[in-house]
Image (cartoon, helix red, strand yellow):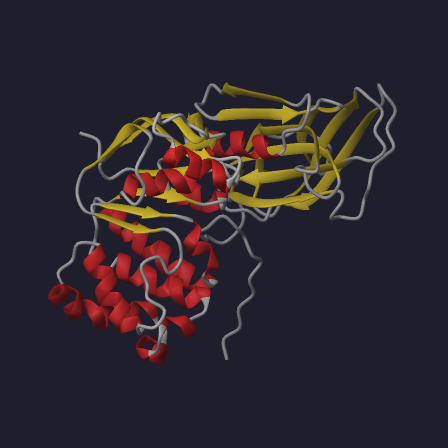
Amino acid sequence: MAAVAVEGLGKAFRQYPSRWARLAEWLDPRGRPRHRLHWVLRGVTFAVAPGEAVGLVGVNGAGKSTLLKIVTGTMAPTEGRVRVQGRVAALLELGLGFHPEFTGRQNAVLAGQLLGLPAGTMRALLPQVEEFAEIGGYFDEPVRVYSSGMQMRLAFAVATAVRPDVLIVDEALSVGDAYFQHKCFARIREFRAAGTTLLFVSHDPAAIVQLCDRAVLLDGGRVAQEGSPEGVLDAYNALIARREAATLRQQVLPEGGVRTESGSGRVRVAGVRLCNEAGEEIALARVGEAVRLGVRLRAREAVEALTVGFMLRDRVGAVVFGTNTFHLGAPLGPLAAGEEREVVFSFPVNLGPGSYAVTVAAHGGAVHVEENFHWVDRMMVFEVANVDRPPFVGTAWLPVRVQVR
């Protein structure tokens, strides 16, 4: 049985043309509606298996937070139903359930009770909550003097004081500092290893890829795509770059990965090749070897300016490195219709052994979301092998020198 099952879920809010229309609807003995329904979720269906981690992605207003509120029971659906197995801990809006005049210690006890923990149990857990939150003397100060980061520290420490069956985390973690984010992710991984089911909302692709087994893309309140984190994030990336007449196409590659293409097509990426210093095309590079990545482009329409970029991802889809001609101070353009160009990026392969996928993009401005001409994910894959370097671990190779004194 699924730990979380969402079936045909829909949520609509009533919209009145004026406050008098609302009053007239209340007083009308015939019950004639004076409102229209605004649907923020419609027909949402998916399931999360016990112990599985699923990431929810989508642009602002796609319905992610509303969906999580319905799953946690703080909001009722208009249609459909949600079934959740086990105890749920949720970290949604910052300070939700905290009383500003109560101290962090007092709020911790109250918030723990809202999560279903007896007051005595929560008081016994207070030393652990205080230790994890690391807010010092502020633990006994009113929450109204807390910064947003301190509120997040306290909220996460309380929500995870006892391992829940289902952990739901919204964007709240994004306000924390890097140190505490690492600490939170470590606890989430610990819970996952122990069997906790995770529903996770984030705009950070790396966090989705590293924490989640699967992802669901919401667009306009509906499920637009469901599948591997890499494939769904590629579709999300194309979605936020979509413009009038833009296209989105995905294909499953022979090795099981998903290639995503999007863009208006005004300029297209015609090909990519990786070469060594002798100009020979290669599929295997040595650690530290100097290589050249050539990107061939063809303009279908005239463009005034063009930016070309590339991005490297490791085997799990995490971004290792990315840059473009705009940031490198090498602008292109203008290009006439039918004109072809090749952009060559030269760099040393300071990467760890493994497989790496190359994503390329042609666009206007500094980033592809401004005017996306052609985005191609996983356009090529190459291998890196350690042939003549001292053994090391990780996805980056650093030319380290050592001295003993």
Picture layout, residue 261 above or below residue 125: above
Q: Quadrant of residue 364?
A: top right
Picture layout, residue 377 above or below residue 75: above
- Please report the residue visible at 45 percent of the width from the left and 69 percent of the height from the top: 147
- Is residue 6 shown to the viewer in this render? no
Position of the N terminus by quadrant: top left
- Please report the residue visible at 40 percent of the width from the left and 71 percent of the height from the top: 144
**Where is residue 117 drawn, in percent x and y?**
16, 58
Q: Quadrant of residue 228?
A: top left
- Please report the residue visible at 68 percent of the width from the left and 45 percent of the height from the top: 347
Query: Is 128 in front, or is 272?
Result: 128
**Where is residue 199 drawn, in percent x and y?**
33, 41
Is 125 placed left or right of 20 in the picture?
left
- Please report the residue visible at 49 percent of the width from the left and 48 percent of the height from the top: 395
Query: Is 2 in front, or is 268?
Result: 2
Is 226 placed left or right of 52 in the picture?
right
**Where is residue 166 drawn, in percent x and y?**
24, 44
Query: Is 36 in front, or is 348?
Result: 36
- Is residue 185 shown to the viewer in this render? yes
Q: Quadrant of residue 286?
A: top right
Is 317 placed left or right of 377 in the picture?
left
**Where is residue 216 drawn, in percent x and y?**
41, 32
